[in-house]
Image (tube, grey):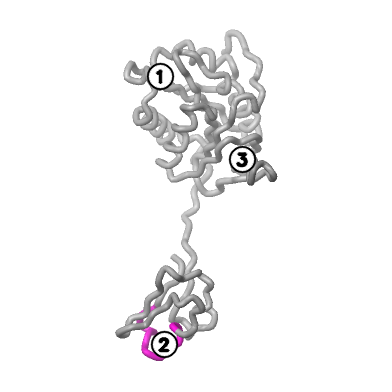
């Protein structure tokens, strides 16, 4: 919301006083109308020292989400020409560690064509469930089609966290899907941790690698993170998973 002008309290005396008070010249009073322009630095001098109640500062009300509505740590399976990129298996290993903290299932999302072999392979790495969007029209990567499939999966399943490999496809797809759900995305994470309240702690280098930034997204779901290849270890493959 920010600064709010209460018109019923505006008159020549209060208007002129506020105009004179602003150190940035951001308040104007003409023809009985008080206005705040783009020069405002939000210093709140007008609130603290101006005529009482004429201008107030109102915090934006944030509607809190119910985190219990979202369950599962999902890995997007990056498949190119029928082959699952190895970063996918590394992310499954990390997803299993994160999910164990909050007792959530581990999912994998597959988008493509003739993906049965890939689905079976993902299950052998310990994924609890694989969701496959398999259609001839998805044989080749198409950003719009893949985004629609990804968004449909999120709307139906409501995963809490989503891990995506920082491949060419992952780097283009993840931010587009995250934007659809008005949620954040942390790119090129080097470390991931899970809080007991299901907040994903996303850690990545910042300021040229001089510091490590810890990023959380406490009031939006799902939580998105992309991770480069060879950051985490893949779990051992299990033959004939149940």
Residue on which the image places disc 3: 202
Earlier sequence position, callout 1 versus callout 2? 2
Earlier sequence position, callout 1 versus callout 3? 1
| Vertical arrangement, residue 11 with respect to residue 191, above or below | below
Residue 10 inside the magenta-drawn segment? yes
Residue on which the image places disc 2: 16
Residue 88 lies in quadrant: top right
Q: Nearer the viewer, residue 135 or 46?
A: 46
C-alpha gap between disc 2 and disc 3: 49 Å
Q: Position of residue 44 (x, y in %)?
A: 52, 74
Residue located at (58% from left, 35% from top): 188
Q: Position of residue 230 (x, y in %)?
A: 64, 24
Q: Looking at the image, which residue sits at the far left?
A: 31
Give the position of the C terminus as an image quadrant: top right
Give the overall secondary structure of the magenta segment: helix
Can residue 195 be seen here?
A: no
C-alpha gap between disc 1 and disc 2: 66 Å
Q: Looking at the image, which residue sits at the far top?
A: 240
Residue located at (40% from left, 41% from top): 180
- Name the mark nearer the viewer: 2 or 3: 2
Secondary element at image label 2: helix
The segment highlighted magenta reads 6-19
C-alpha gap between disc 1 and disc 3: 28 Å
Can residue 182 be seen here?
A: yes
Secondary element at image label 1: strand
| Vertical arrangement, residue 107 with respect to residue 198, above or below | above
Residue located at (60% from left, 29% from top): 95
Secondary element at image label 3: strand
Give the position of the N terminus as an image quadrant: bottom left
Residue 65 inside the magenta-drawn segment? no
Residue on which the image places disc 1: 112
């Amino acid at each position: 919301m920010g600064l709010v002008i209460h018109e019923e309290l505006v008159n020549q005396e209060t208007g002129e006083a506020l105009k004179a008070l602003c150190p940035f010249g951001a308040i104007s009073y003409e023809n009985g109308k008080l206005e705040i322009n783009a020069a405002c630095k939000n210093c709140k001098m007008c609130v603290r020292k101006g005529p009482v109640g004429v201008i107030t500062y109102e915090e934006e009300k944030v509607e809190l989400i119910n985190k219990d509505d979202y369950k599962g740590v999902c890995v997007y399976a990056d498949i190119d020409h029928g082959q699952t990129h190895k970063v996918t298996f590394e992310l499954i290993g990390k997803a299993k560690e994160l999910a164990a903290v909050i007792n959530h299932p581990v999912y994998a999302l597959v988008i493509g064509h003739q993906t049965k072999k890939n689905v079976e392979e993902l299950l052998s790495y310990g994924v609890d469930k694989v969701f496959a969007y398999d259609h001839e029209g998805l044989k080749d990567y198409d950003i719009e089609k893949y985004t629609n499939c990804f968004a449909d999966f999120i709307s139906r399943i409501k995963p809490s966290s989503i891990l995506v490999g920082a491949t060419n496809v992952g780097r283009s797809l993840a931010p587009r899907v995250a934007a659809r759900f008005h949620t954040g995305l942390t790119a090129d994470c080097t470390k991931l941790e899970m809080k007991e309240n299901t907040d994903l702690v996303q850690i990545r280098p910042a300021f040229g690698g001089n510091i490590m930034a810890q990023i959380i997204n406490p009031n939006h779901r799902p939580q998105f993170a992309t991770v480069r290849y060879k950051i985490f270890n893949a779990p051992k493959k299990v033959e004939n998973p149940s």
